[in-house]
């Protein structure tokens, strides 16, 4: 059928592998899951979009965010407390475990779910394994060797390069959270909050970098000599640096200014970066708030039309209150439920995926009938 071109499904050809039980030059359909049931390690392979994988991705994102916030603070010479040492040890063990989990994590490639252990391990070994091994080895060295200098501890920032690996997971996780917010205002507020948190995270990094530059001994004059005294607490140093960072992204000013060439060059670079970031963020938030305002105005207009109808018809106060209360509780003024026929992008899915989509959407409705449920 495939050779004659009569199959309605899209097909992909795979190369022959050394195992006789694998698909040899076979033709597989988009949406299929490839497994090697004769392999002992098949039982340990996780689906790429399963619940266990999602929980693990959220856990790793949590540790990554901890590194993003805490590791740059070593520029201020924060003490290596018991809490930081414990979190460092837990983080190293978790990232080491992630290497093992990645060896048994299936992946999606051109619409096909690859779950065969040999394929999964081969892809990981050719992509992220050398990079993860280098970072994990450095993590264990920094954990075992005590008394590392603050400069050496700053090399832990290399762990933050994992954002390239976790970038897609972060996108799909935040997208999944936003998709579960039914209210339009709530979804818009969630997106605006995400933008503000992203800006705060950027300012956090810039503040730590600005203080690190001010701590260099290449020049006699440094910006840290003026606002700080030898006994200034770390909290005051950080808030001052964070305040300076915010002024580079907004039309504001403060008493801190560069005093040497490196500080001046860094300030100029931050000004250009701030112009681009602030203008983009401002336009995005403005469009988001305008969208929310238009939706609120539309809901208010529908509510006012209902009130005018009640007044013009001379309905009783009791019936009018019942109508408005029911509409408010039932949320009838909000958007109507979506249908798959109204989404053009769904029509581009392969037929096998479209069939699976219709089964999951309509099976709960059809199964209500006892006879149809028995046939299912």
Image (tube, rainbow, N blue to C red):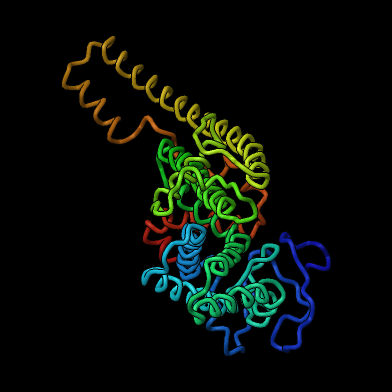
Quarter assignment of residue 8 = bottom right
Taking the view exactly as shown, the residue that stands out farthest to the right is 4
Q: In the picture shown, does residue 207 fall above or below 90? A: above
Quarter assignment of residue 85 = bottom left
- Which of the image's four quarters has the N terminus? bottom right
Q: Residue at x 69, y 87 (%)?
A: 21
Task: Measuring from the top left, give residue 252's x and y in whole percent.
Answer: 51, 30
Task: Measuring from the top left, give residue 304's x and y in whole percent.
Answer: 34, 17
Please state if 159 lies on the left or on the right of 348 as rendered.
Answer: left
Q: Residue at x 47, y 25 (%)?
A: 294
Q: Residue at x 76, y 83 (%)?
A: 17
Residue 63 or residue 188, whichever sits in front = 63
Q: Residue at x 50, y 35 (%)?
A: 255
Instruction: Say if residue 13 shows up in the picture.
Output: yes
Taking the view exactly as shown, the residue that stands out farthest to the front is 220
Instruction: Say if residue 376 shows up in the picture.
Output: no
Please state if 92 lies on the left or on the right of 9 as rendered.
Answer: left
Task: Measuring from the top left, give residue 370's x and y in whole percent.
Answer: 36, 61
Task: Measuring from the top left, give residue 289's x and y in whole percent.
Answer: 48, 30
Residue 310 or residue 227, whichever sits in front = 227
């Amino acid at each position: 059928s495939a050779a004659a071109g009569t199959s309605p499904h899209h097909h992909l050809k795979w190369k022959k592998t050394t195992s006789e039980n694998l698909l040899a030059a076979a033709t597989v359909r988009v949406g299929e899951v490839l497994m090697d049931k004769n392999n002992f390690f098949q039982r340990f392979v996780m689906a790429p979009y399963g619940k266990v994988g999602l929980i693990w991705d959220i856990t790793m994102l949590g540790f990554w965010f901890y590194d993003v916030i805490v590791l740059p603070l070593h520029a201020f010479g924060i003490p290596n407390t018991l809490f930081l040492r414990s979190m460092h040890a837990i983080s190293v063990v978790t990232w080491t475990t992630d290497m093992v989990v990645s060896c048994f994590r299936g992946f999606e490639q051109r619409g096909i779910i690859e779950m065969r252990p040999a394929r999964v391990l081969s892809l990981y070994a050719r992509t992220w394994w050398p990079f993860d091994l280098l970072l994990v080895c450095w993590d264990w060295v920094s954990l075992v060797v005590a008394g590392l200098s603050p400069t050496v501890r700053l090399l832990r920032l290399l762990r933050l390069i994992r954002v390239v690996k976790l970038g897609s997971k972060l996108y799909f996780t935040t997208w999944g959270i936003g998709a579960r917010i039914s209210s339009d205002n709530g979804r818009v507020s969630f997106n605006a909050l995400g933008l503000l948190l992203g800006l705060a995270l950027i300012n956090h990094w810039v503040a730590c970098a600005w203080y690190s530059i001010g701590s260099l001994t290449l020049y006699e004059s440094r910006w840290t000599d003026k606002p700080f005294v030898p006994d200034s607490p770390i909290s005051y140093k950080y808030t001052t640096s964070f305040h300076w960072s915010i002024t580079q992204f907004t039309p504001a000013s403060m008493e801190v200014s560069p005093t040497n060439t490196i500080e001046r060059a860094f300030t100029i670079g931050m000004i250009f970066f701030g112009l681009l970031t602030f203008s983009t963020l401002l336009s995005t938030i403005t469009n988001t708030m305008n969208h929310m305002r238009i939706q609120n105005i539309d809901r208010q207009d529908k509510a006012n039309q209902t009130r005018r109808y009640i007044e013009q018809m001379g309905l009783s106060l009791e019936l009018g209150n019942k109508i408005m209360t029911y509409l408010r509780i039932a949320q009838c003024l909000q958007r109507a439920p979506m249908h798959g026929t109204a989404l053009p992008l769904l029509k581009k899915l392969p037929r096998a995926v479209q069939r699976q989509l219709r089964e999951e959407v309509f099976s709960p409705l059809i199964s209500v009938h006892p006879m149809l449920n028995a046939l299912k």
